[in-house]
Every structure is written in C-alpha cells, then in structure tokens.
Amino acid sequence: MALNFTDLKKGTIFQLDGVPYKVLDYTHKMMGRGSATVSVKLQNLLDGKILDKTFKGSEQIEPADVTSRPIQYLYQANRQFYFMEPENYEQYDLSGLDDQVKFIKEGENLTGQFFGSRLINIELPKNVWLKVTQAEEAVRGDTSTSVTKDAETETGLKVKVPAHVKTGDVISVDTASGSYRERQKG
C-alpha cells in the first residue's frame, strides 16, 4: 500500500528507488490554487547521507519493508556502534547514531529496525534513566524564577536540570527533546 506525501512526518521510514530513508525534518507548504508541496530532509539509512527532497501533488511513496527485533547495545569504536541480537548472538554495526547514542548505555536492550537482514536504525524508548556524573553548584538565594543548571550524565549527555539535582542522582530524560523529566525517588 503506497503512502501519500502528506502521510510523511518526522521519523517516518519509507522507500525511494529501493533505498530506505528516514524523515528528519518536514515542512508542508500550501501553494496558490490548492496545490501543496512537502519539503523533507531525509537520511539514507544504508549509508547515512542526508538529502533534501520536495514532493509535489499526489506523489505516491512506497513504505519501507522494515521489521523490528530486539537488540542489545554492546559498545562504540571509531564512530561505529555495535549491537547484538540476544536470540542468535548475531552482531551488527551501525554509524550515524551520534545524537541517539547519548541516551543509551552499554548492555542496554533496545529495538532494532531491519531492512531485509540489515540493521538500519534503533528505536529509543520515550525516556531513559541516567546517572548524573557532574552537576554545577546551584546559586543560593536565586529562587525568583525556576532555577536550572547544567549537568552531564554517564553517557555524556548534557542536560538542564533543576537546582536540587546533585552529582550521583539518577534522572529521567525525554529522548525526543533531550530534556529533564524527573529525579528518581529514594
């Protein structure tokens, strides 16, 4: 079943000329007399290259035949990220995950997206729990506004946190926005 270009949104994976692409950014434009275009920034999921494309009118887009399977994050070496399928111990490498890898720890279980037998993407959970390894000191007496400070987590992610968060605390971070959600109780 073909997709209409208006079905595209950020994160959608589709196939163009036999190659799977992921939508990174999406802009819908209405032109005069009812015609519309969609400008998208795409990432080629086989080689990681970024390209801009505009779809017009009633262009049809093929959905990519992508399957999801459980995988485990193993390690990173030279901007390559290594994963394993727990069922059969088959290992895969993936590049271009610089933004996503700051949300995952070695040994963490995730969902991998496969195009045929090739791992092309990972799905992050909505939020993750990470330990704060470094947090700035809060300024005393500055309580007229909501006070935030910079903190760094065990994965290297930098995040703005409330003044009460200290080094060693475990916090929840929203993976879509990279923002602080809450501190672990206890």
Image: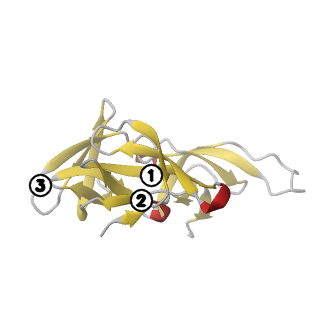
| Residue 41 percent across, percent down from the top left | 48, 44
Crowd rating for badge 3 (residues with CA inside 10 Å; few <14, some 14–19, many 20+): few
How far apart are labels 3 and 1 at the CA level? 30 Å
- Please, what is the three-letter code of the amino acid marked with disc 1? Val
Q: Position of residue 26 (x, y in %)?
A: 54, 52
User: Looking at this view, is 75 or 170 the one in front?
Assistant: 75
Secondary structure beneath label 2: loop
- Proximity of marks 1 and 2: CB atoms separated by less than 8 Å: yes
Q: Residue drawn 81% across and 45% down?
A: 139
Q: Earlier in the sequence, mark 2 or mark 3?
A: 2
Question: Does residue 151 show up?
Answer: yes
Mark 2: few, some, or many residues within 10 Å (few <14, many ≥20)? some
Disc 3 element: loop
Q: Which residue is mark 3?
A: 89
Can you tell which of label 2 and label 3 is closer to the viewer? 2
Which numbered disc flags the more N-terminal residue, 3 or 1?
A: 1
Residue at left offset 44%, top offset 57%: 11
Query: Hey, which quadrant is residue 32 in on the image?
Result: bottom right
The kind of residue on which mark 2 rests is Thr
Amino acid type, residue under disc 3 in the picture: Tyr
Residue 123 seen from this side: no
Name the side, left or right, on which 53 lies relative to 84. Answer: right
Q: Is residue 41 left or right of residue 104?
A: right
Q: Which comes sooner in the sequence, label 1 or label 2?
A: 2
- For the residues labelled 2 and 3, the Cα–Cα distance comes to 28 Å
Residue most toward the front? Answer: 33
Residue ID for mark 2: 12
- Residue 151 is situated, as x and y percent measured from the top left of the image, at 61, 45
Relative depth, front residue between 178 and 38? 38
For this orientation, the residue located farthest to the left is 88
Q: Which residue has dot 1 on it? A: 23
